[in-house]
Amino acid sequence: MSAFLAVVGWSLLAVFLLLLVLLLFPVSVPIELQQDQVVIKLKVLFLTFQLYPKREKQEAKTPGKESGQPAAESKQHTDEKEQAQATSEKKKSRLDLSQLAQLVSTACWLMRIVFRLIQIRDIRIVYPVQGEDAAQTAIQYGRINAYLGSTLGVLQNFLNMHFKQVDILPDFNGNCKYQRYFYCKLQAIPIIMIVAALYALVRLKGEKVI
């Protein structure tokens, strides 16, 4: 019996250490847009999972059979639903303005932390610009360069971004319309994200917001 318990204990310890190691390694989500087709994947160590689009079509859900519930049961279900909604509204009304302000402040703080912890790597942007004529194409090319430069400058103040390629192509002849391309890789360490979320919950709990 003691040998069996020892085996179980060591097995649980091995599983715990494996999960801890997985949480310490970064997880990445590559996002790619090519010819109006989006592909999103999830990479954990040497494993890769395709999140979108799904490779296998999901089976259509069959509608359930109509059930002839008695009127009394239906009324009871409606009353329970109304009571649950009333209880939920009472809980919402307990939040005064100070608690709501604290909740918003903590949420904003957590979002800033999350945005800084998530790394956006290997950003590649290839965007062809085509107008009605050559003059219109040149005007749109200048505008997009100006807008893109200012927008990316602002985003870099809030996000941890690393650009590898940014090409805006003036397409005067219409030969570059199929070269539109976007790629980025979202990367984060799960254990740090979990610690940040737990700290936010403890902070809200300590200030009696939740």
Image (cartoon, rainbow, N blue to C red):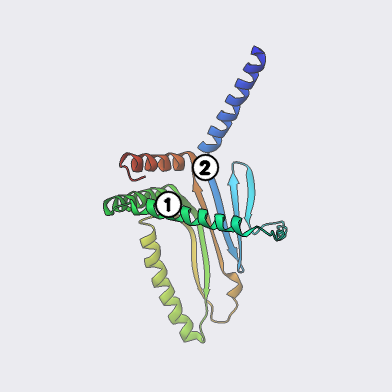
Instruction: Give the image location of residue 22, x and y in percent.
Output: 56, 37
Q: Residues within 10 Å of mark 2 (few under 14, many from 20)?
A: some
Instruction: Give the image location of residue 161, x and y in percent.
Output: 43, 54
Q: Residue 156: which quarter of the image?
A: bottom left
Helix, strand or loop at label 2? It is loop
Q: Amino acid at mark 1?
A: Thr
Q: Residues within 10 Å of mark 1 (few under 14, many from 20)?
A: few
Checking the image for residue 122, the label placed there is none
Which residue, as the protein is rendered here, is positioned at the far front? 72
Q: CA distance from mark 1 to mark 2?
A: 41 Å
Residue with the mark numbered 1: 87
Residue with the mark numbered 2: 26
Which residue, as the protein is rendered here, is positioned at the far left? 98
Q: Is residue 173 above or below residue 164?
A: below
Instruction: Give the image location of residue 210, x and y in percent.
Output: 37, 45
Position of the N terminus, as image quadrant, is top right
Q: Identify the mark nearer the N-term, 1 or 2.
A: 2
Residue 160 visible? The answer is no
